Image (tube, helix red, strand yellow):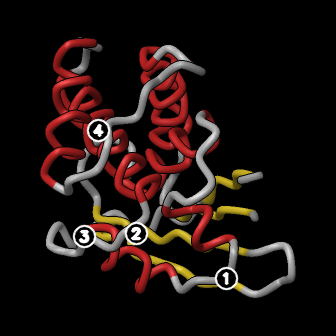
Amino acid sequence: MKLIAQKRGKNEKYDRLRYVRMDGSETSSEMPRQGILPHDLVHYVVESGLPLQHGFLSLVASGADAGFVMEAIHDKTNLQVEIEAVQTEAIVEALQSQLWSGVFDIDAFLDGVRGACETRQKPVYAFAEIDPEALYHRAIELNRQWMLLENYQSLELDFP
């Protein structure tokens, strides 16, 4: 799937992300501006860096509407959400808080992941395959690319 993230005008509150699937179908979502890498692009960092099959982007790539998946995954009262979808969201949220702080604190990151998973009554992701700090550095690099874009420019990413 190809992700096309477009910065909108200077005074806009939202940028846009298009998800173009391999079959040519697509969906899209609004990305609130927050001064750091948008949440959905943090999903790209996490889901392209970890061997997860049921995260937000994987579900969209398999044909689900972005809005529907977003609501289901972010609804903390929905205990039927796939384990990997919850783990992915927990990692994204914890990584996003690290981006906000400007430094990587492994203990704070892991506490954030643990708390988010426990809230949804799901097991915590084990991180056996990758050092979480590597995700942080990938997010910093993608954030750098995102910040260099001018208004109305796009960034294209391939999601496997």
Q: Is residue 139 left or right of residue 21?
A: left
Give amino acid for label 4: Gln
Task: Give the CA distance from mark 4 to mark 1.
Answer: 26 Å
Q: Position of residue 147 (x, y in %)?
A: 45, 40
The amino acid beneath tag 2 is Gly
| Mark found first going from the N terminus, 2 or 4 | 2
Image position of 87 (left or right of 17): left
Residue occupying the point 25% across, 35% down: 113
Question: Mark 1 or 3 closer to N-term?
Answer: 1
- Snapshot quadrant of residue 5: bottom right
Q: CA distance from mark 1 to mark 3?
A: 22 Å
Q: Does the rendering let one see residue 96?
A: yes
Instruction: Identify the residue position indicated by label 4 in the image.
Output: 96
Q: Residues within 10 Å of mark 3 (few under 14, many from 20)?
A: some
Residue 135 image point, x, y percent: 49, 25
Give the Cα separation between the discs numbered 2 and 3: 38 Å
* Mark toward the start of the polypeptide (3 vs 4): 3
Q: Amino acid at mark 1?
A: Gly
Give percent across and percent down for residue 99. Answer: 29, 29
Q: Residues within 10 Å of mark 4 (few under 14, many from 20)?
A: many
Counting other residues with Cα less than 10 Å from the Cα at mark 2, is it few (<14), some (14-19), or many (20 or more)? few
State the mark number for residue 9: 2
**What residue did someone put label 1 on?**
63
Are there few (<14), some (14-19), or many (20+) residues within 10 Å of tag 1?
some
First in sequence: mark 4 vs mark 1: 1
* Secondary element at tag 3: loop
